[in-house]
Image: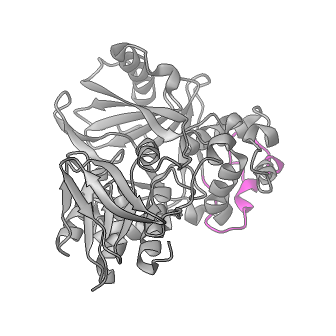
Amino acid sequence: MAGTVHVVGAGLAGLAAAVRLAPAGRPVALYEAAPQAGGRCRSYHDRTLDMVIDNGNHLLLSANTAALAYVRAIGGEGALTVAPESAFAFADLATGERWTLRPGAGRLPAWVFDAARRVPGTRPGDYLAPLRLLFAGPATTVGDRIPPHGALYERLLHPLLLAALNTDPQAASARLAAGLIRETLGKGGAACRPVVATGGLGGALVDPALAHLARRGIRCRFGASLKAVETAGSRATALLFAGERVPLGGQDSVVLAVPPRVAAALLPDLRVPDEFRAILNVHFRTETDPPSVAAILGILGGTSEWLFAFPGRLSVTISAADRLMDCPREELARTVWDEVAALTGGARPMPPWQVVRERRATIAATPEQEARRPSARTPLTNLALAGDWTDTGLPATIEGAVRSGERAAHLALARAL
């Protein structure tokens, strides 16, 4: 009989690995230390707002083929809304200007010659600037290739790269930025249609996965905190959970889909990223949906960066938000609400609110941290790594997490670890 694949961690990387393994004929055991699945990408009921919210606002694009294929495989597509076209609305609080970026659907960027489609104040030649990133070396930052000024940088590249990398673009890896541009704008507007979990992250990415796995006899063991990995020679021989030792047979494999700090503690010789960036989300419960706000709105000239409009809720995301982690919660909520109110219809009393801070939301997307991201393969021939912090070629995103899980599952199935 084929050996069991033990998937440790039920965040998106672990779930993606288990979903990939489920139809392959190998027994699968899934473990999660927390009382719920999803990791940093989940939904929960907030008592203050008395509604279900996501712990963070995560935007997918139509270019995220692995993530969208995963959603289709688990039957979660009903909780996603795919925009009919590539369009990104922006508002500048400092100047009062509003505009919508509308890249053309094809790869040929003819849209840059249409002033109504491109960023105000830019010229067609400005859009050659991202090409400077494409042949960057591993130690090169975005700042080494693109100066931090000019309408294109200030009104498009900076907000988009900051959101995608969760790191100040000037200090971020040029290679990561180039990879993002190749997979999105480089493929044309058809690859840049926004995809939003209007039904919640849990309803799109997590709950359907657990149900999908359960129908195949795979049930997650929650509260299973892995304390150690026993090894002999080049193989993992046992998993030590709190109060339980799980021996590994000669045909068994392990997919270790845990955070980098946990992985480093379990595998002492493993080099992992050790610098992180925060993300701040502020949620407001609204009785009516303001008609004047786009489903997704990029905000310049203020503290707020991206505004997401959901039924009955407005949510603001601020990336690389380490500077705001110790700011009083009500002060943050008031600052953000004043900006949101100005964009959605004038001054109004602040509605019920909630501030959600993720101090270690993602690894820092710097060249130094990029060099610390390990491969899915490890010196242990029956153990592979998964997680958005591994070497996926992408920043710490949903797409990267799913790809990492599928890569680890492939290694487990091939036993080419």
Q: Residue at x 45, y 33 (%)?
A: 279
Displayed quadrant of residue 191: bottom right
Count of numbered tags: 0
Q: For the view shown, which residue lies furthest in the right direction?
A: 125
* Residue 40 shown left or right of residue 169 in the figure: left
Q: Is residue 362 left or right of residue 246?
A: right
Residue 234 appears in view: yes
Which residue is located at x 67 percent, y 49 percent? 177
Report the front residue among 66 and 114.
66
* Colour scheme: one colour
Q: Position of residue 239 (x, y in %)?
A: 30, 58
Magenta stretch in the rendered image = 102-126
Looking at the image, residue 349 lies above or below residue 223: above
* Secondary structure mainly formed by the magenta segment: loop
Percent across and percent down for residue 142 are 73, 42
Examine the rendered structure and indicate whether residue 360 appears above or below residue 116: above
Q: Residue furthest bottom?
A: 1
Q: Residue at x 41, y 19 (%)?
A: 338
Above or below for 410 versus 86: below
Residue 154 place in picture, x, y as percent: 69, 34
Depicted 69 relative to depicted 264: above or below: below
Residue 313 quadrant: top left
Q: Can residue 81 be seen in the rendering of this structure?
A: no
Query: In front here: 25 or 162?
Result: 25
User: Is 108 part of what is drawn in magenta?
Assistant: yes
249 drawn magenta: no
- The residue positioned 68% from the left and 48% from the top of the image is 118
Quadrant of the snapshot with the N terminus: bottom left
